Structure formats: C-alpha cells, structure tokens
Image (cartoon, helix red, strand yellow):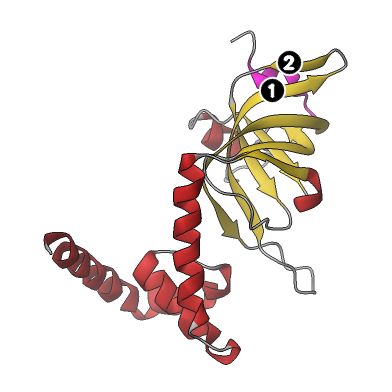
C-alpha cells in the first residue's frame, strides 16, 4: 500500500521515531555470548500507526518485529507506545544453508524490524483492556515466584514453565536435558492430561 511503513525503510538501518500498538505478550530470548553476563533480549510484534518525518507525523500501516536489547517489564499486549530505534529490513540469507530471516518474516507479513535499547527509548502512551488482562497474567506469574527463595529460583522457573507455560532463557540447559533424556515427552503428555481434566472440571 502507498502508506506502508516499508516505504520508509532503506537497505541500511535508519533512525526512526515510531508510534504503534503492541500485539501479543513480548517474549524473552538469549543474547550472544560475549564473555560477560548480559540480560536476555526482548522481542515481539508492533503494529505501526505513525512515523515521524521532516514534515511531522505521518499515518502509516504495517507490522514490525520489535527487538529490545534490555527487557522492559512495562510492555504488555495492547499498549500504545512511542519508540526511538533503528528501522530496517530483517537480514537476508547471505550464505548457502543460512536461515533467511527476511523470507521468514515476510511470509508472516512482518517485512521490517525495529531495534531499540530499552526503557529510555520507549514511551508508553496509553493502556488498553487487553493490556490489563496481560497485566493480570504477569501478576500471576510473578506471584508464583514469591514463595521461593533466591536459592530455589531454578525450581520456581521450572514450576512456572510447567504450570503457566512461560519459558525463561535461564532454563535453556534444563530444556536440553529434558530433550536429550526424553523426559520432555512425558512432561508434555502429562500436561495434556492435566489440561483435559482441568477443562472438564
């Protein structure tokens, strides 16, 4: 479309001031190992509504992959946010056999990516009914951790993953052990049975 945000993207990253609506709950992922501990990166989907140009704010359309270097706990589903970050297209595959992020996200109608650093570059403009529901979910997840000490954090994360389905990057090693030992299959089957019983009740 003539108003699509892709028209404001070039081959190299461009600094952009974007306003849009968060879609879905942000997910956490690991960052590359650089020899020193770093917090996980946050990623999610942003429906872009406006972009600032030399002539002021312009209405646009389109979705973007939102990547935040430092996780922002304020971000919830349905919030209207204003962000400052680098707007670009997801990277294309440069070598044979390399994963083609550009094709992957284009197939999901997400042709652009917006990278930002954290809370200092994010302004939450308004809440929504959807974000209140997401806030309740986050409250339940946090409440589950309150009954555990710092020494029992691994147990708390495992319990939260099994009960609420929330995966934490700190559990990557545990997930690999579950996969290698075949335990993950039994956990998945048991979870299905528990879900069926709970739904019936």
Which numbered disc covers residue 197? none
- Location of residue 13 in the rendering, given as x and y in whole percent from the top left corner: 80, 33
Give the extent of the magenta segment.
4-12
Residue toward you, 34 or 84:
84
- Pick out the residue farthest to the right: 54
Residue corresponding to mark 2? 58
Q: Label 2 neighbourhood size at 10 Å, few (<14), some (14-19), many (20+)?
A: few
Q: Quadrant of the N terminus?
A: top right
- Pick out the residue farthest to the left: 200
Q: Quadrant of the C terminus?
A: bottom left
Contact, CB < 8 Å: mark 1 with mark 2? yes
- Pick out the residue farthest to the top: 2
From the viewer's perspective, tell me whether residue 165 is left or right of residue 33: left
- Pick out the residue farthest to the bottom: 151
**Which of the 4 quarters of the picture holds residue 38?**
bottom right
Residue at position x 69%, y 30% in the image? 19
Q: Earlier in the sequence, mark 1 or mark 2?
A: 1
Label 2 secondary element: strand
- Location of residue 192 in the rendering, given as x and y in whole percent from the top left corner: 22, 65
From the viewer's perspective, tell me whether residue 146 is left or right of residue 50: left
Residue at position x 20%, y 70% in the image? 194
Label 1 secondary element: strand
- Location of residue 95 in the rendering, given as x and y in whole percent from the top left corner: 66, 42
Residue toward you, 147 or 151:
147
Rendered view: 69 above or below 126: below
From the viewer's perspective, tell me whether residue 133 is left or right of residue 7: left
**Which of the 4 quarters of the picture holds residue 160?**
bottom left
Residue corresponding to mark 1? 50
Residue at position x 64%, y 12% in the image? 3
Rendered view: 163 above or below 2: below
Residue 9 among magenta residues = yes
Mark-to-mark CA distance, 1 and 2:
5 Å
């Amino acid at each position: 479309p003539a108003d699509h945000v892709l028209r404001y993207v070039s081959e190299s990253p461009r600094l952009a001031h974007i306003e849009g609506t968060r879609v879905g709950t942000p997910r956490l992922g690991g960052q590359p190992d650089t020899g020193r501990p770093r917090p996980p990166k946050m990623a999610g989907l942003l429906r872009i509504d406006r972009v600032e140009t030399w002539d002021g704010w312009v209405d646009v359309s389109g979705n973007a992959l939102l990547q935040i270097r430092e996780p922002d706990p304020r971000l919830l589903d349905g919030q209207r946010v204003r962000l400052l970050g680098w707007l670009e297209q997801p990277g294309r595959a440069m070598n044979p056999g390399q994963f083609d992020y550009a094709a992957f996200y284009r197939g999901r109608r997400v042709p652009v990516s917006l990278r930002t650093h954290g809370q200092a570059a994010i302004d939450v403009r308004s809440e929504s009914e959807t974000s209140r529901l997401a806030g309740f979910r986050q409250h339940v997840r946090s409440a589950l951790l309150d009954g555990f000490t710092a020494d029992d954090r691994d147990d708390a994360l495992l319990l939260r993953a099994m009960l609420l389905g929330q995966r934490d990057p700190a559990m990557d090693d545990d997930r690999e052990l579950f996969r290698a030992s075949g335990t993950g299959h039994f956990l998945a089957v048991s979870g299905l049975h528990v879900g069926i019983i709970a739904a019936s009740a």
